[in-house]
Image: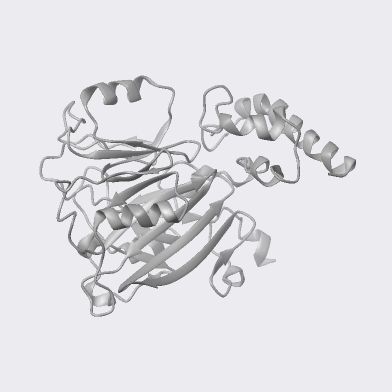
Amino acid sequence: MKMPVRILLWALCAVTVLGMPFVLSAPNQVAEPPVDWDEGAFAFLLPSACAEEVTEENAEEAAVLPDEKYALPVDFSAGMELNPAAYTENGYQDDSISVQMETREVDGVKWRIAYVQIKHPSQLRTAAAGKLTSSKTALPSSMAKAKNAVVAINADYFSNDPEKTRFEFRQGEQITKNRGNKFTNNIKDVLVIDANGDFHTFITFPKETYEALMASDIQIVNAFMFGPTLVHEGETVEISEEYGYNPTGNEPRTAIGQTGPLSYVLVVAEGRTDESEGVTQQELADFMFELGCVEAFNLDGGNSATMVYKGELYMDKAASSERAQSDIIYFASAVDPAAWQE
């Protein structure tokens, strides 16, 4: 590496680290700072980014740190208005987000895939059809349009739980109505997305796990109790034949996975059609692993399985058959429209 480039990268690291106290104390901060340099999920980046020499081989990884310029409020507000000129042939690209869409047909299954890279964890967001304590539903496409989603998928339909005993967070708020103090489950898995945008999957969620998580330094932004966990710590999970609805049958499925720092994939396997028969949960797990996920989680499937892009269904499902649901997961742009409306 040429010396000027090396010096520049070292300088950027130094400015990032030394500037954190000012960020932490800055007034009118729209969200909690996403990086805990001692124990946070991004701490593993420091050896390659600053402690070791930055080389051509690790420079790209070293550069993947949250950019506070693109921080959005951690609440239920919408993402920034999307720039029509930012759409590419197969996705969307602006200074804060890159989305690439793909349709892949393999062995009688049509896979819908969205590869997403963002600049700040707050761009990974959730939306609900109504108040978190209500049972209101809406079409995922309608919710996605209202929130200016670049791309969105259905979440876990939390309101469709008759027992109301789920461990659920949306945009930093815990859903507690009718749940008392019971948030554990010895059958269901849990996905937690923290303030760094990192995924934490839990194979079942007993009392001990719940108590340890709530006592930890993990800042929970979103949490889902559905599953199963598909990929855990870089390894494919062997799915129980007793997990959830028809785990060994061919069904439409939805999944979300993390592939790296601020890097994700959204997947819908279409099913119950002449063009696509659907997949088993194990086949979905294997597919998410093949896509490079280090953590991946199954969400509500069947008729709920939905992907929305450009405000429309990104799948063969007819708009007339779209199922109204309680919530979505989506990715937003953080570029101020004033930057491209001039």
Residue 328 in view in this figure: no
Q: How is the structure coloured here?
A: one colour
Would you say 142 lies left or right of 176 here? right
Does residue 171 appear to the left or right of 1 in the view shown? left
Left or right for 173, reference 3: left
- Check the image and report above or below for 95 versus 213: below
> x and y percent of residue 243 in the render?
17, 46
Above-or-below relation of 179 to 119 = above
Residue positioned most to the left: 162
Q: Residue at x 43, y 27 (%)?
A: 218
Residue 93, given in percent of the width and then of the height, sits at: 60, 63
Q: Which residue does the image show at 75% across and 46% down from the upper left? A: 56
Is residue 121 something one can see in this rendering? Answer: yes
Quadrant containing the C terminus in the rendered view: bottom right
Between residues 68 and 38, which one lies in front from this camera angle? 38
Q: Position of residue 144 (x, y in %)?
A: 39, 61
- Residue at coordinates 59% horizontally, 48% vertically from top-left? 119
- In the picture as drawn, the residue positioned furthest to the right comes out as 3
The x and y percentages for residue 138 are 26, 61
